[in-house]
Amino acid sequence: MLFPSDEPLRGPLQEFDFDTDEEEGDSPKAPIGKRKKSKQAERPLKIIPTASDASSDDSDASDDEERVTMANMEARSKALDARAAAEAELDAEELRGAQEDEEEDEDVDMDGEADEEGNMDAEPFHLPTAAEREEEKARGGPDLQVVQRRLRECVRVLEKFSKRAEKGRSRSEYTGQLMADIASYYGYNDFLVEKFFQLFPVAEAIEFFEANEVSRPVTIRTNTLRTRRRDLAQALVNRGVNLEPIGKWTNVGLQVFESSVPIGATPEYLAGHYMLQAASSLLPVIALSPQPNERVLDMASAPGGKTTHIAALLQNTGVVFANDANKARTKSLTANVHRLGCKNVVVCSYDGREFPKVMGGFDRVLLDAPCSGTGVISKDSSVKLNKSDRDFTLLSHLQKQLILCAIDSVSPESKTGGYLVYSTCSVTVDENEAVVDYALRKRPNVKLVDTGLSFGREGFTKYRGKTFNPSLNLTRRFYPHVHNMDGFFVSKFKVEKRTKAQSAPVDAEMKEPADEGVDKEESAGFDSEEDRPYLEGSLSVLLEDGCILTLLFLQRRNEGG
Ligand SMILES: C[S@@+](CC[C@H](N)C(=O)[O-])C[C@H]1O[C@@H](n2cnc3c(N)ncnc32)[C@H](O)[C@@H]1O
């Protein structure tokens, strides 16, 4: 029985017995050199286990299904032999890697390097020289097996460089080769590969890239305005849907393992009993924790997954202002609001930076900011190639402006709230910690508080020579390779009353935030010299969520138009 209790699923958390719900904390990470062939099977501890975890890699199944005839039998059997030999070779190599690592881990004082060649008859690994790389390029690039092996070997060397590197070769040569191979193997631009390498240790970066190749589990959120999770689950099970609660941290989420009906077109879906929603996008609303009768602003809300969740937590009391700058996107927002039976939602379409001039005094504000989408690459692989340095500069500035306006829209006098949640579906520091740190510096009347989320990695307090406010450890990061959910960032602020000395007019900051002794890059406004080349260049950057309008608006504003 999936749902053991008869208690309504609103209110306190249900006690479901999942052994996969612990935090990722100490989960062991298998370096690529030690990993088995099935990428899924090696994934670290998850918040959401996948149905495919138990199955083996069946990517070759279609080859085997080809009909065997007298004509193709010999070719087939040769191909099978070759494949078996290649696999045996890879297995032997991995075994050697694992043995070497074990030996080294057991006795770090053992003298000398591991014997890579003495055991089996594989070629020792040689890092190509620049000339060899050129030759390889001229031949049309390396074949898949060469790249796979090189990825593993470079990771292995970089983990214990002084012991494992070829004599005379530098760390940057290995890193350069690794990044080039990752870019070609996974199909990223060089800039983004480097950006992710700055975020994770080498072996973990590979885990991240691999996780982006795999779809996240399909999840839905029960709309408690229309039904209870137990009833919804039963109705869907009756239609042939195989599902389970997501985890202890949510009492409305369900993970769909398989379904004989389209999950976005069941009668329950059409009747608004659930929203198709990624597990990670439940997190900002859980952190926001809206209370009945409150006045809430969802500043960038289309298509409304979080708005309708907020409306449900308010139990259709109070009011949610669901805003989005992109008018076209408010159509799907309005449709979702109607389908889910939310009666406390007002849809509007302003640039978020017009708040709180449009209206203010909110008990809680959610800013689920427009972002690069680097947390959702498995859903939108175009991000791999279409994001540049310039995009991150523009986005980070927009996010900094939006967050100040979001803070100023919160009523510090709220009896029940006074909170802002800032979230993105991006994993870069520029769009997350740097934005939050900026807000803390610009608004001394706010502080970070615990998100209330029971898992997730702590946000960075130091990153590439920058030191952020130590309270950044209260923010939470979620990763595809760790939590098996979209990459996400969640932070929660408490807004206090401003003292006179702290007050600064919003308008001034919209044009050029005052330099309060922070480093130049952080304090630059949109019309700073630094940003002008970006803004004056072509503005046809297609961001994840249609930010084009926003950028045009900014340019006109800067031109005094
Ligand atoms: C990450 S999406 C929001 C997803 C939404 N919260 C949900 O859960 O369905 C970001 C949204 O920000 C909107 N947006 C972009 N620039 C904006 C701005 N300056 N002010 C308000 N909204 C903006 C985009 O149109 C997009 O719908």
Image (cartoon, rainbow, N blue to C red):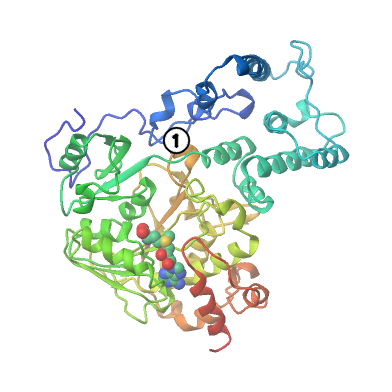
Residue bearing mark 1: 24
Q: Quadrant of the N terminus?
A: top left
Question: SS of the residue at dot 1?
Answer: loop
**Residue 195, horizontal then vertical, whole percent:** 63, 51
- The reply to whether residue 331 is in sight is yes
Image check: 372 left or right of 388? left
382 or 342, which is in the foreground?
382
Going 58% across and 70% down the picture, which residue do you hit?
540
- In the displayed structure, 230 sits above or below 321; it is above
- In the displayed structure, 84 sits above or below 133; it is above
Q: Which residue lies furthest to the top in this view?
A: 119
**Residue 12, horizontal then vertical, whole percent:** 19, 44
Q: Residue furthest bottom?
A: 560
- The reply to whether residue 404 is in sight is no
Amino acid at pointer 1: Glu
185 or 473, which is in the foreground?
185
291 or 267, which is in the foreground?
267
Report the image quarter containing ligand 1: bottom left
**Residue 45, horizontal then vertical, whole percent:** 44, 31
Going 56% across and 37% down the picture, which residue do you hit?
210
Answer with the quarter of the image where residue 263 lies.
Answer: top left
Image check: 174 left or right of 500? right
Going 22% across and 53% down the picture, which residue do you hit?
270
Going 39% across and 36% down the picture, which residue do you hit?
47
**Residue 91, horizontal then vertical, whole percent:** 63, 17
Q: Which residue lies furthest to the left in this view?
A: 6
Image check: 194 left or right of 474? right
| Label 1 Cα neighbours within 10 Å, binned few <14 / some 14-19 / many ≥20 | some
Image check: 477 left or right of 315? right
